[in-house]
Image: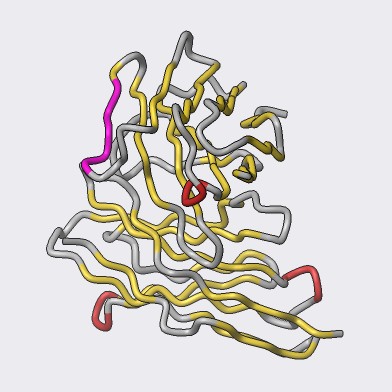
Amino acid sequence: AQKVTQAQTEISVVEKEDVTLDCVYETRDTTYYLFWYKQPPSGELVFLIRRNSFDEQNEISGRYSWNFQKSTSSFNFTITASQVVDSAVYFCALSEAGDDMRFGAGTRLTVKP
Amino acid sequence: DAMVIQNPRYQVTQFGKPVTLSCSQTLNHNVMYWYQQKSSQAPKLLFHYYDKDFNNEADTPDNFQSRRPNTSFCFLDIRSPGLGDAAMYLCATSRAPGGRETQYFGPGTRLLVL
């Protein structure tokens, strides 16, 4: 069965610090998809990125970057120069080709001014 | 902008009194999902519709039902809400079913049961 582990329950940083959110996954499939979502206090889940298992290229989008490593079954998310607006709960999720998406428990990030 | 809309954002109901939450989408997606999210937990999938085909998760209580009268709208009916049903209810859509498709979420409806 597929499984996602986000070991960091809560992280607190000061503005402008870099922060990395960890995500480790388990799957037996060779074809799978990984996602990151952001959930600000308003409650809406905001899609950030999708990565398929055949594409290990790292991705950068502004201050956000993602490091996908199949060798360690990890899909970590780094925010560079964090801002107060980055404060949210971040969910990593995994789906196998024919299955529904399963979320990790989430990491609550607090960025203090 | 294409989007997923949920109304109301906050809903208060009484113990045992039926309540309906609504979701609409302008994305013209074929799949619509309902998730339940309790405080400090991950969203939990209740069921989804692929077009008119209803797919229920095995552990979704019978108290929860859903209707999809057309492509744009999907409703979540809670027949007899209990105190344990207080949660955020999230609607999501995707173009097609299956793991490769990205799901886009609405803002959620926060349900309070008195």
Q: Residue A8 location in percent, x, y? A: 48, 84
Q: Is residue B84 magenta?
A: no
Residue extending farthest to the top is B69
In the rendered image, the vertical position of residue A19 relative to residue B15, given as above or below: below
Q: Residue B48 location in percent, x, y? A: 36, 31
Left or right placement of residue B80 versus residue A97 in this view: right
Q: Residue B72 location in percent, x, y? A: 54, 16
Q: Nearer the viewer, residue A55 or B23?
A: B23
Q: Nearer the viewer, residue B12 or A113?
A: B12
In the rendered image, the vertical position of residue B31 relative to residue A3, given as above or below: above
In the rendered image, the vertical position of residue B68 relative to residue A77, given as above or below: above
In the rendered image, the vertical position of residue A38 relative to residue B109, given as above or below: below
Q: Read off the magenta span.
A: B54-58
Residue extending farthest to the left is A28
Q: Nearer the viewer, residue B40 or B51?
A: B40
Left or right placement of residue A111 versus residue A108 in this view: right
Tell how many labels. Answer: 0
> Residue at position x 33%, y 59% from top?
A94
Which quadrant of the figure contains the N terminus of chain B? Answer: top right
Q: Residue A82 location in percent, x, y? A: 74, 80
> Residue at position x 68%, y 36% from top?
B11
> Residue at position x 39%, y 26% from top?
B65
Left or right placement of residue B103 versus residue A13 in this view: left
Left or right placement of residue A33 versus residue B113 in this view: left
Model colouring: secondary structure
Quarter of the image holding residue B6?
top right
Magenta part mainly helix, strand or loop? Answer: strand
Quarter of the image holding residue B60?
top left
> Residue at position x 35%, y 35% from top?
B47
Which quadrant of the figure contains the C terminus of chain B? Answer: top right
